[in-house]
Amino acid sequence: MRDYAKLQRDIHKTLGIDLTAYKEQQMRRRINQWLDRYRLASYDELVQTLVQDREHRAKFVEYLTINTSSFFRDTRVFDVIEEVVLPDISANRRPRIWSAGASIGAEVYSIAILMREARFTPGLLLATDLDEAVLEKAKTGIYLPSQVNGMEPKYLSKYFKQLDNGNWAIADSIKNMVVFKQHDLLKHPYERNFDLILCRNVFIYFTSETQKRLITKFVHSLNPTGYFIVGSAEQIMDPASFGLRRVSYCIYQKSA
């Protein structure tokens, strides 16, 4: 029998990641798949390997934090961002925007591209993630051909350059708009006074209690009438209880 409660304690001590905040069945399945992949016989052997092998530890953290993203992911959401949200928050001011759980940076760079197209200037375009390794990848702004699939050709030709190896590098003019920081949503304090916060496809891995706690903290970090955007599988069932109203699919606005 694998002692998951002990693993939770060991992972928290070794990596600082609180597994109790995540849905147990989903997380156990992912960890067990990792054990099978690396032929580790037990949770104790996993923890021992994490302590002794820095490379294994880095790979495990990246795997555990589930870094998947793509440019302009979910066009229904980005259409509203482009046509409603960004013009609203950029009227007569430089908005503060936060992409939480930024992964490889595709989401925040998509926002940067739309702002550049509309000639809006952000006061802050912040991208955070728990995984420092994936943030380093995001900072380089280099993407595989598969990661830019589906992007409108006008954006690809205007804001990317194809390298000799076939990968695509995003323009410095876009890259330099973004500030990347390591941040643990469960432990670290949240910055304040944002006009737009995106936290998409992150809540689905947390328990309902953790989701409620994080939504409350995000709303507290928003300016009045600021926007909060979640993933397609993360609809907020009672937005009014958090001081939000539903604006559109996946998009909510804080009350004035």
Image: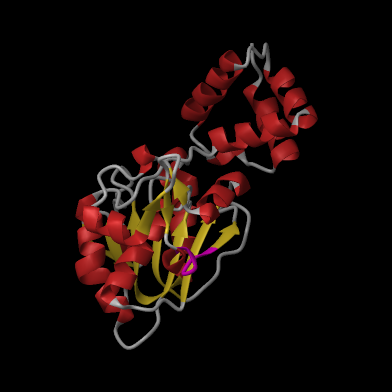
Chief secondary structure of the magenta portion: loop
How many numbered badges does the structure rendering display?
0
Foreground residue among 112 and 228: 112
Q: Which quadrant of the view contains residue 157? A: bottom left
Residue occupying image coordinates x 32% and y 79%: 90
Tell me where residue 119 sits by quadrant: bottom left
Farthest residue to the right: give it. Answer: 52
Magenta-drawn segment: 175-179
**Residue name at image x 57 percent, y 37 percent:** 62
Residue sitting at 34 percent across and 58 percent down?
229
Q: How is the image coloured?
A: secondary structure
Residue situated in front as seen by the camera: 254 or 99: 99
Is 168 drawn above or below residue 90 in the view shown? above
Left or right: 54 in relation to 78: right
- The image position of residue 99, as x and y in percent, is 44, 59
Evaluate whether residue 254 shows in this view. no
Residue 35 against residue 98 in the figure, above or below = above
From the top left corner, tell me how far across and down residue 79 is, in percent.
20, 60
41 left or right, relative to 218: right
Hey, which residue is sitting farthest bottom in the picture?
92
Residue 10 makes an appearance in the image: yes
Estimate the x, y position of residue 51 in percent, counting from the top left: 78, 31
- Relative image position of residue 49 (x, y in whole percent): 74, 24
Q: Is residue 59 left or right of residue 128?
A: right
Q: From the image, which quarter does the C terminus lie in?
A: bottom left
Residue 131 lies, with reference to residue 35, above or below; the image says: below
Q: Is residue 255 magenta?
A: no
Quick check: 46 left or right of 212?
right
Q: Quadrant of the N terminus?
A: top right
Task: Please name whichever residue, 138 or 166, is drawn nearer the observer in this view of the structure.
Answer: 166
